[in-house]
Amino acid sequence: MISVSETAKEKLLSLMDESKLSHDSYLRVGVEGGGCSGLSYKMDFDGKMTDGDQLFEDKGIKILVDKKSFLYLVGTVLEYSGGLNGKGFSFNNPNATRTCGCGESFAV
């Protein structure tokens, strides 16, 4: 399962409102090769589910993950930190053995 913190949920709903997206829209998360640690996180809103997607729902947020990315993201919590020292969205990934300083890439 992939889950979202309460602060991440609030920010995602706010972003959906700003983009005039329905709260029924999907949050698509995944990984791709790249970044200083080998794999990078990706995240965007999506309007449709495709074959091979895994669907999770947490705190009213519908999350889509392709099968390959799910292997790297199982158990991950999407966090959000705002404010002056906030870094925005981050992935608290229990599968990552190493992360870069900015938190946008990881290795397993």
Image (cartoon, rainbow, N blue to C red):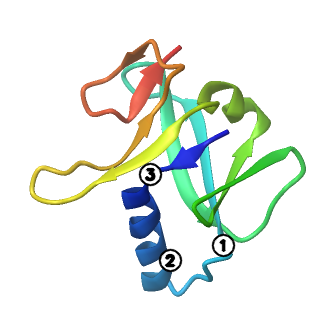
Which residue does the numbered mark 1 point to in the structure image? 25
The quarter of the displayed image where residue 83 is located: bottom left
User: Identity of the amino acid at label 3?
Assistant: Ser
Image x and y of residue 104, in percent: 38, 35
Circle nearer the N terminus (2, 3): 3
**SS class of the residue under badge 2?**
helix
CA distance for labels 1 and 2: 8 Å
Which residue does the numbered mark 3 point to in the structure image? 5
Residue beneath the point at 52% across and 45% down: 42
User: Identity of the amino acid at label 2?
Assistant: Met
The quarter of the displayed image where residue 62 is located: bottom right
Image x and y of residue 48, in percent: 78, 67
> In the rendered image of this protein, does residue 8 appear above or below residue 38?
below
Is 85 displayed left or right of 42 in the figure?
Answer: left
Which residue does the numbered mark 2 point to in the structure image? 16
> In the rendered image of this protein, does residue 30 appear above or below residue 106?
below
**SS class of the residue under badge 3?**
loop
Q: Are marks 2 and 3 in contact (CB under 8 Å)?
A: no
Q: Are marks 1 and 2 in contact (CB under 8 Å)?
A: yes
CA distance for labels 3 and 1: 18 Å
The quarter of the displayed image where residue 59 is located: bottom right
Judge depth for marks 3 and 1 and give the one in front: 3
Residue beneath the point at 63% across and 54% down: 28
Residue beneath the point at 27% across and 33% down: 102
Circle nearer the N terminus (1, 2): 2
Is 95 displayed left or right of 105 in the figure?
Answer: right
Is 92 displayed left or right of 55 in the figure?
Answer: left
